[in-house]
Image (cartoon, grey):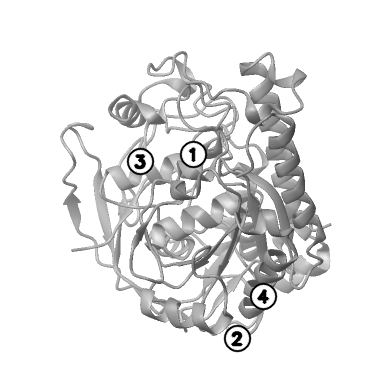
Amino acid sequence: MRLSTIPLMVSALLAATAAMAENPHAGHDPHADHTPMQAGEAAQGHSLFHLDAEWRTEKGESFRLDALAGRPTIITMIYGSCTTACPVLVNDARRIDRAAPEAIRERLQVVVVSFDPARDTPERMADYADDYDVDPKRWRFLHGDPADIRTLAAMLGVRYRDNGDGTFDHSNVVTLLDARGRIAERNEGLARPVEPIVQALRNLQDGRQAAGMTAW
Amino acid sequence: MRTLLIMLTLSLPPAVHAEAPGIVLIDGGDWELPIVREESTGPGRVDDFALDVRQVTNAEFVDFVRANPEWRRDRAPAIFRDTRYLSHWPRADALGEGNAAPDRPVTRVSWYAARAYCREMGGRLPTMTEWEYASERQREALGISPTDYAHQLFSWYANPGAGGLRPVAEGPASGLGIHDLHGLVLEWVEDFQLVLGRGDDIDLLTGSCGDTARFLPEFDEAHYATFLRFQSRSNYRPDTTTSTLGFRCAYNPE
């Protein structure tokens, strides 16, 4: 295990403690996910949808992360001119997408966010998307503001550095978000087995069915 | 030393607070972080930037929280701050004594909260390179030798915040006209999550002696003191809040 995953685990523990303190029933409920959303922040406390940023898709359309609400999402961060790790990361997301059971896959969303707003224009992201031959209805390639990119990376636990020469050093992480934008699983590294995230997707779906909710 | 000093008055949204601290314009230059990284490309260019003369105070931050209640400790989304966020204040929107007094630097603020504050002020957090550049220029302007710099930092890092925090900006601004870069509280920077190599394979958290040596371009006390600061930053998470970590804002010169 990488050391850098430890803070996230600590974070999850703290979050669980905080949620239990604020909602005395949360600890008794294995499917706290489906408790009716209350005004308090505990239910959605760790949702990435709190990031109120406007992105641009590869089609040039405005996009906000909360548009992902209601369905699970695979998200990763790359830069388009990267020829080393990034194609592997996008391919890892595609491998997960292809390995998911069909009923899940047709509801699964995949988001690829660029570190490089200067070069990865929506037009260039569109070319990039074409290269990968992925379902354009479920995949989004996002271009954003540098400060928002930095925030999203922090929320995902992705470290990166702009080397100033068109290259970026960055961590390689593929993250699964649940339907409320909370991190459900992280896959750190390149060309890792897809099964942990695929299993986490199944667990999310099972949780919804056990709660009497419709599939996504 | 070609650092140019210009005192500017910051224009602020009137709702936030009426009395703005000064900012100082720092002339850029070619510079390289005093730390060895993988595939270092040599000195980079630091562009001119402006920096708050002093750290953000409790008084300023409580004004921000009152104007932006989504940043109250009882309302801020948990993803943006840990459970100790502003916990030293007696109430969510009121200050108190000691480290919660109006003139003390605000502490127990997350990176997200610090960035939100600076954005509200029309600025941003300084980058790590900018902050370290200012620190080095300040040391030169004050005529502090590298050894004295190291000893002062060791003494402070050994027990930061001991006996309660002092008010910000006591006495005249020194050197570049900046207060408290060292010795009061540590400060958030925009890119605190330093990446030293490709991916996370090389990480300060691994912290073995061999790694430490590899990051030091020179094995003197000053480089080691500076390295400790990088290492402590590397231990933060963006939602981290501590009693010895505050911030000041930077601005792009117009």
Q: Are marks 3 and 2 in contact (CB under 8 Å)?
A: no
Q: Is residue B216 visible?
A: no
x 35%, y 52%: residue: B124
Looking at the rendered structure, whether the residues under marks 1 and 2 are on a common chain is answered as no
**Looking at the rendering, in which quadrant would you find the N terminus of chain B?**
bottom left
The kind of residue tagged 2 is Thr
Front position in the image: B141 or A75: A75
The kind of residue tagged 3 is Tyr
* Foreground tag (4 vs 1): 4
Front position in the image: A213 or B10: A213
Q: CA distance from mark 3 to mark 2?
A: 37 Å
| Residue located beneath label 3 in the image | B117
Q: CA distance from mark 4 to mark 1?
A: 48 Å
Q: CA distance from mark 1 to mark 2?
A: 44 Å
Q: What is the secondary structure assignment of the residue under circle 2?
A: loop
x 34%, y 46%: residue: B118
**Looking at the rendering, in which quadrant would you find the C terminus of chain B?**
bottom left
Residue B20 at x, y percent in the picture: 21, 38
| Residue located beneath label 2 in the image | A83
| Residue located beneath label 4 in the image | A91
Q: CA distance from mark 3 to mark 1?
A: 20 Å
Q: CA distance from mark 2 to mark 4?
A: 12 Å
x 37%, y 79%: residue: A123
Compared across the picture, whether A9 is left or right of B83 comes to right
Q: Quadrant of residue B143?
A: bottom left
Q: Counting other residues with Cα less than 10 Å from the Cα at mark 1, is it few (<14), some (14-19), or many (20 or more)? A: many
Residue B86 at x, y percent in the picture: 49, 26
Q: Which mark is residue B184?
A: 1
Q: Counting other residues with Cα less than 10 Å from the Cα at mark 3, is it few (<14), some (14-19), or many (20 or more)? A: many
The kind of residue tagged 1 is Leu
